[in-house]
Image (spheres, rainbow, N blue to C red):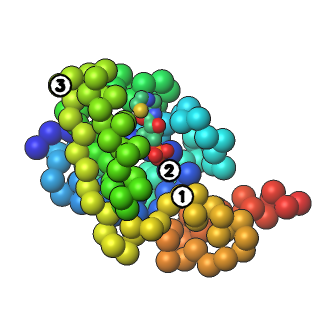
Amino acid sequence: MGIVVYPGSFDPFTHGHLDIISRAAKIFDKVIVAVSVNSGKKPLFTIEERVAMITRECCHLENVEVGYFHGLLVDFVKEKNAQAIVRGLRAVSDFEYEFQMALTNRNLSPELETIFFVAQPMYSFLSSSIVKEIAGLGGDISGFVSKGVAEQLRIKYTNKKT
Ligand code: PNS
C-alpha cells in the first residue's frame, strides 16, 4: 500500500517510536524513518548516532529504511516518492502541534497526506525529552527504551559529568 515517511527528532529512539514503526510496517510496503537534521532543538545525539541507533533497533523489520533530511520534510517525501507522512498521536496535547504541521505540509504539498497512528496507552505519556530528563538524573529508563539505547544514554550523561 505504498511508501510512507515517518519523520522526527528521535533524540533518543524510544519504545513508542518502535511501536508506531512496527504498526506502519504491517500496513505499508515501505516505511522510511527520517531523522530531521535541523528541527530547531539542540540534540543530545548526533545525526549519525541517531541513524545508526534506529537502524539497529529496526533491523528485524525488512521493509523499514532509515535516513535523514535537511530542510523541508515535504521535499524529502517527494524525493523518496512517498505518498504520505506518518506521525504518532499521544495525548490531546499533541493535537495542536500535529494539526498545524499536517496543515502546513498539505499547504506546501497539496497531494501529500498525513496519517496518524494513535499511541498505545502504555506509551501515551512517553517522550524523548522525558527519557532524557530521567536518564540525566540517574533514573530507570528500562521500560521506555531498549537496552542499547539505555546504555548509549548512560555513556552520554557520564561523559557530560566528567
Ligand atoms: O520528533 P519531532 O521533533 O516532533 O519531529 C518534528 C519534525 C522533525 C517532524 C518537524 O519539525 C519537521 O518536519 N521539520 C522539518 C522542517 C519542515 O518541514 N517544517 C515544515 C513543517 S512543520
**Distance from mark 1 CB to nearest ligand 1 atom below 8 Å:** yes
How far apart are the two marked residues, 1 and 2, measured between alpha carbons? 7 Å
- Report whether residue 131 is seen: yes
Q: Secondary structure at mark 3?
A: loop
Tell me where residue 110 appears, x and y as whole percent: 21, 23
Tag 3: residue type?
A: Glu
Say whether disc 1 or disc 2 marks the residue closer to the N-terminus: 2
Which dot, 1 or 2, sits closer to the camera?
1
Q: Residue 47, image x and y in percent?
A: 57, 40
Is residue 143 rendered to the left or right of residue 77?
A: right
Determine the image quadrant of residue 20: bottom left
Q: Helix, strand, or loop for circle 2?
A: loop
Residue shown at the point (54%, 77%) measured from the top left: 142
Mark positioned earlier in the residue sequence (3 or 1): 3
Query: Which one is earlier in the sequence, the residue at label 3 or at label 2?
Result: 2
The mark found on residue 65 in the picture is none
What residue type is disc 1 on? Ser
Determine whether, in the image, residue 135 is placed left or right of residue 75.
Answer: right
Give the mark toward the camera: 3 or 2. 3
> Mark 2 belongs to which amino acid?
Phe
- For disc 2, the marked residue is 10
Q: Is residue 37 left or right of residue 157?
A: left
Q: Quadrant of the C terminus?
A: bottom right
Q: Quadrant of ligand 1?
A: top left
Tag 1 near tag 2, CB within 8 Å: yes
The residue that mark 1 highlights is 128
Q: Residue at x 54, y 48 (%)?
A: 50
x 22%, y 29%: residue: 112
The yes-or-no answer for disc 2 within 8 Å of ligand 1 is yes
Rendering coords of residue 117 (x, y %): 26, 55
Mark number, residue 111: 3
**Distance in Å between CA atoms under marks 3 and 2:** 26 Å
